[in-house]
Image (tube, rainbow, N blue to C red):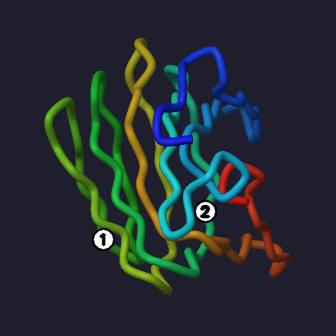
Amino acid sequence: MPVIQASQAVVHELHGTRFTSYARPASGSRELCGWRVEFPGHTEGVAHRVGREEVLYVLSGSVRVGLDDVWADAAAGDAIVVAAGTMFRVDNLADEPMIAWVTTTTGFGAVMADGSWLTPPWTT
């Protein structure tokens, strides 16, 4: 289906973060996945090594992101480019939530800090 209505989006919660899935193979997208992510205020992220490149466009709020050993701040209007193989973490130090739109390719997954592999359901 070329138009995915908001009412058709599927919400997932993981590690205290909300992922609202729109584009993925299960919704008809063959190559790309797109979802809205919400990091609540005062949330320390979970480090993970991404298997494919992903891009987060910050819609509102601000966060501190770790890309391998480099830390930077990102706020509304900024884009975060996470290269495949990068250890990635998002910390929201602010009171308000940070909301972003995320795009990646199908087959996306990540290696968690404990060595386990995670294929998020919002990418399948």
The residue lying at 71 percent from left, 28 percent from top is 11
The residue lying at 23 percent from left, 43 percent from top is 74
Q: Is residue 57 above or below residue 120?
A: above
Give the alpha-carbon distance from disc 1 to disc 2, as whole Å.
13 Å
Q: Which mark is residue 47?
A: 2
Q: Is residue 13 left or right of residue 88?
A: right
The residue lying at 61 percent from left, 62 percent from top is 47
Q: Is residue 45 left or right of residue 26?
A: left
For mark 1, give the secondary structure. Answer: strand
Q: Name the residue tied to disc 1.
A: 70
Amino acid type of disc 1? Answer: Val
Query: Label 1: few (<14), some or many (≥20) within 10 Å?
Result: few
- Determine the residue located farthest toward the bottom in the rendered image: 85
The quarter of the picture where the N terminus appears is: top right
- Determine the residue located farthest toward the front in the rendered image: 1
Residue 109 location (% of width, % of height): 67, 72
Residue 110, located in which quarter of the rendered image?
Answer: bottom right
Tally the numbered discs: 2
The residue lying at 54 percent from left, 21 percent from top is 5
Give the mark nearer the N terminus: 1 vs 2: 2
Amino acid type of disc 2? Answer: Ala
